[in-house]
Image (cartoon, rainbow, N blue to C red):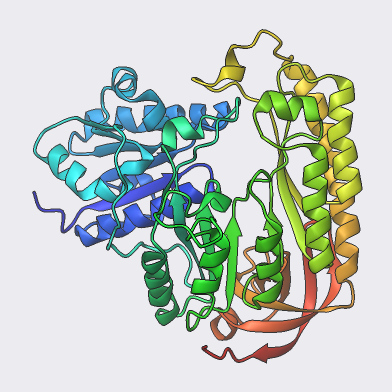
């Protein structure tokens, strides 16, 4: 079947891992001859890359699917694909619920999209959710940005948090080789990308499934070693990473982040709860006190580092006193940003079956109270930027003010300033901060730094 004039549209839900998978699948589709369609209603192939962490995201997928399923009755050649975590979780039951679907594929099959679609074009309805070893994909992703890019370093997760469906839908940990990761980064550097975010569901676990140990008994390949290995990639000015797990976060990693100038002073380390009993019930493998020691160590080596995290309120059995322990942790640490969510029971997770579920009213009240405190603390943290000169990597035009450009500081603070996007996109600009808000800054450009390749 020829696809030379066919158009595709991808809608992505959820995390950075999904966004990276979508870019890769877009690259595969364009290699097959598809063209991108801005409007899904003008597309011949629609792919939903789904997330199952929260129930509302899952329900939104079904809403979108319903509209396109109706369209398929009028346009039989329309190809409908559901990828990602909902696909992995639901499998064949998705076809029973939405029989118009052509392909259901789990996240570990993203690199096999071409083969799976070829089977679809031969007249088959395909479900691909079986566990597989993720092979290296030589397809160039269709990057949504020309300045920043995602690079996967480890797939899957071996943790068994009692609230989380990720191990069920993304499979076991599979680390890419350092050589493959560096080769992808080198190519991105050649293409002009200035910032790369290294991705993993549990990035601190990188390398423990790869062969080899050191003379001291440590894994031969660790995430710390990977940072040393890729730091000198020519053209790349900044390196970020996410997501870290407090159980495995080490002082050795903190030291290398302080030592290597390209590694941004920004750490995303979810704590989920500030109460030790709840952390144990969640299966997180650390305590409130250990988390505090991690943050204290970061600030010992990098006093100005930005700290962001994730937190859950309303976990089954959470008492008011336990919730207040979370508030206390947020008050004591003062996060630059905190992603918050009310607990949502997910299929196949132990906590979803517990009888001590909290009411939606209690969860909503606690979420509002936590978000209020987060805004206060973030605003306090922002004050340190006032009057300072920050280096900002310009990413795009300010969509609300075309006279301004937007970018991020090394600490990941969104920053706006007056400038021409045609001249400044991808440039590192020194900006004097004149306005501070809880989650963003405004400033005046001082100097454009010319990047020097290592």
Q: Position of residue 60 (x, y in %)?
A: 50, 31
Give the quarter of the image for residue 326. top right
Q: Position of residue 26 (x, y in %)?
A: 33, 55
Q: Residue at x 76, y 34 (%)?
A: 273
Q: Is residue 152 toward the left or the right of residue 282 in the image?
A: left
Is residue 10 visible in this depiction of the protein? Answer: yes
Asked whether 356 or 95 is in front, the reply is 356
Give the quarter of the image for residue 366. top right
Tally of numbered discs: 0
In the rendered image of this protein, does residue 188 appear above or below residue 422?
A: above
In the rendered image of this protein, does residue 18 appear above or below residue 370?
A: below
Q: Residue at x 68, y 83 (%)?
A: 429
Q: Is residue 427 toward the left or the right of residue 391 in the image?
A: left
Q: Position of residue 134 (x, y in %)?
A: 32, 48
Q: Residue at x 87, y 36 (%)?
A: 327
Asked whether 375 or 138 is in front, the reply is 138
Q: Position of residue 183 (x, y in %)?
A: 37, 72
Is residue 409 visible in this depiction of the protein? Answer: no
**Outermost residue, front direction?**
215
Give the quarter of the image for residue 126. top left
In the rendered image of this protein, does residue 316 appear above or below residue 264?
A: above
Asked whether 318 or 247 is in front, the reply is 247
In the rendered image of this protein, does residue 222 appear above or below residue 443?
A: above
**Outermost residue, top direction?**
355
């Amino acid at each position: 079947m020829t696809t030379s004039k066919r158009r595709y549209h991808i809608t992505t839900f959820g995390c950075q891992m999904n966004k990276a998978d979508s870019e890769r699948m877009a690259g595969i589709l364009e290699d097959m001859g598809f063209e991108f369609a801005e409007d899904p209603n003008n597309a011949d192939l629609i792919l939903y890359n789904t997330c199952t962490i929260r129930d509302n995201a899952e329900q939104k997928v079904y809403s979108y699917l319903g509209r396109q399923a109706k369209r398929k009755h009028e346009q039989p050649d329309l190809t409908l694909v559901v990828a990602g975590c909902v696909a992995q979780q639901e499998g064949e039951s998705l076809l029973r619920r939405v029989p118009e679907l052509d392909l259901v594929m789990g996240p570990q099959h993203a690199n096999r999209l071409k083969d799976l679609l070829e089977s679809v074009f031969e007249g088959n309805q395909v479900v691909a959710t079986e566990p597989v070893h993720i092979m290296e994909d030589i397809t160039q992703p269709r990057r949504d940005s020309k300045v920043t890019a995602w690079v996967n370093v480890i797939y899957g997760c071996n943790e068994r948090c009692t609230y989380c469906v990720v191990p069920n839908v993304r499979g076991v940990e599979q680390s890419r080789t350092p050589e493959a990761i560096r080769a992808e980064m080198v190519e991105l550097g050649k293409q002009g990308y200035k910032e790369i975010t290294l991705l993993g569901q549990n990035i601190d676990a990188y390398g423990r499934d790869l062969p080899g140990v050191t003379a001291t008994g440590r894994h031969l390949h660790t995430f710390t070693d990977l940072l040393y290995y890729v730091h000198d990639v020519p053209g790349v000015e900044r390196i970020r990473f996410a997501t870290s797990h407090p159980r495995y976060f080490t002082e050795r990693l903190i030291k290398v982040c302080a030592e290597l100038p390209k590694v941004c002073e920004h750490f995303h380390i979810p704590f989920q709860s500030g109460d030790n009993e709840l952390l144990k019930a969640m299966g997180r493998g650390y305590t409130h006190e250990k988390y505090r020691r991690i943050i204290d160590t970061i600030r010992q080596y990098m006093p100005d580092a930005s700290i962001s995290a994730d937190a859950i309120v309303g976990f089954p059995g959470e008492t008011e006193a336990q919730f207040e322990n979370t508030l206390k942790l947020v008050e004591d640490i003062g996060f630059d940003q905190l992603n918050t969510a009310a607990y949502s029971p997910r299929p196949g997770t132990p906590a979803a079956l517990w009888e001590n579920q909290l009411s939606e009213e209690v969860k909503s009240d606690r979420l509002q109270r936590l978000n209020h405190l987060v805004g206060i603390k973030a605003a306090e943290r922002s004050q340190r930027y006032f009057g300072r000169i920050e280096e900002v990597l310009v990413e795009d035009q300010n969509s609300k003010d075309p006279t301004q450009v937007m970018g991020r500081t090394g600490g990941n603070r969104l920053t706006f300033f007056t400038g021409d996007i045609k001249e400044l996109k991808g440039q590192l600009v020194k900006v004097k901060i004149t306005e501070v808000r809880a989650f963003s800054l405004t400033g005046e450009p001082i100097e454009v730094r010319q990047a020097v390749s290592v």
